[in-house]
Image: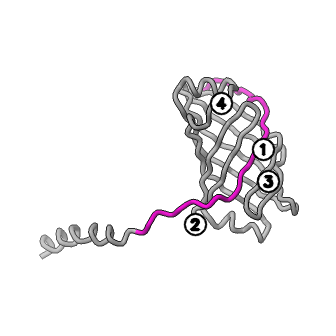
Amino acid sequence: MYKFVLPLLACACPAAYAQQMPAPPQLEFAFEVRAEVADPTIVGRLPTGTRRIIDILGGTFEGPGLKGKVLPGGADWQLIREDGFTEIDARYTLETEAGGLIYVTNIGIRHAAPEVMRRLNAGETVDPELIYFRAIPKFETAVPELEWLMRSVFVSTGERYPNGVIIRYYRVP
């Protein structure tokens, strides 16, 4: 009896789900961070790549209904593999104009053709369109009006420049 029922269910399910598949979510722009950064501190070559730390010196952020400054004291702890592929672990604090604090953890990756990554990691200006720079941020805040930051999923895109970085955050509705 089971031999006949299971194949029928297996055949019917994918078609039923395909017809009911919702549209993928669109991204909503949340805000943009423009951070000033220090020259990298090179920890050294490890078996997994080169570890470097880039201190965040300050900056600004702005989006619909959200504006403030990037506080100094954060950093991006990077691991750069031989081919230039970079693992990113950035942590920093934002302060709104009203004085509310937002702690940001942004875990991501950055990569491009080896020559492009060599130039970028050497501190040269490189066209951001040539680089894949994406991350998944997590926000923490005690400000009730900003609770939405902790109750949504976000993705971010980045652009690296010799003395700064631009990160755009998008909410997944």
Where is 165 relative to 146, above or below? above
Reading the image, the residue beneath label 3 is 94
**The magenta stretch spans residue 32:** yes
Q: Amino acid at mark 3?
A: Leu
Give the residue drawn at x 21%, y 68%: 11
Q: Earlier in the sequence, mark 4 or mark 3?
A: 4
SS at mark 4?
strand
Q: Amino acid at mark 1?
A: Gly
Q: Amino acid at mark 4?
A: Arg
Of residues 126 and 50, the one nearer the viewer is 126
Q: Distance of mark 3 from mark 1, alpha carbons?
A: 10 Å
Whether pointer 2 and pointer 4 mark residues with C-beta atoms closer than 8 Å, the reply is no
- Give the image location of residue 101, x and y in percent: 81, 59
- Give the image location of residue 171, x and y in percent: 62, 60
Q: Which mark is residue 173?
A: 2
SS at mark 3?
strand
Reading the image, the residue beneath label 4 is 51
Of residues 63 and 145, the one nearer the viewer is 63
Q: Distance of mark 3 from mark 2, alpha carbons?
A: 22 Å
Reading the image, the residue beneath label 1 is 74
In magenta, the rendered stretch is 22-46
Q: Earlier in the sequence, mark 4 or mark 1?
A: 4
Give the residue drawn at x 77%, y 61%: 66
Side (left or right) of 153 relative to 33 = left
Q: Distance of mark 1 from mark 2, alpha carbons?
A: 28 Å
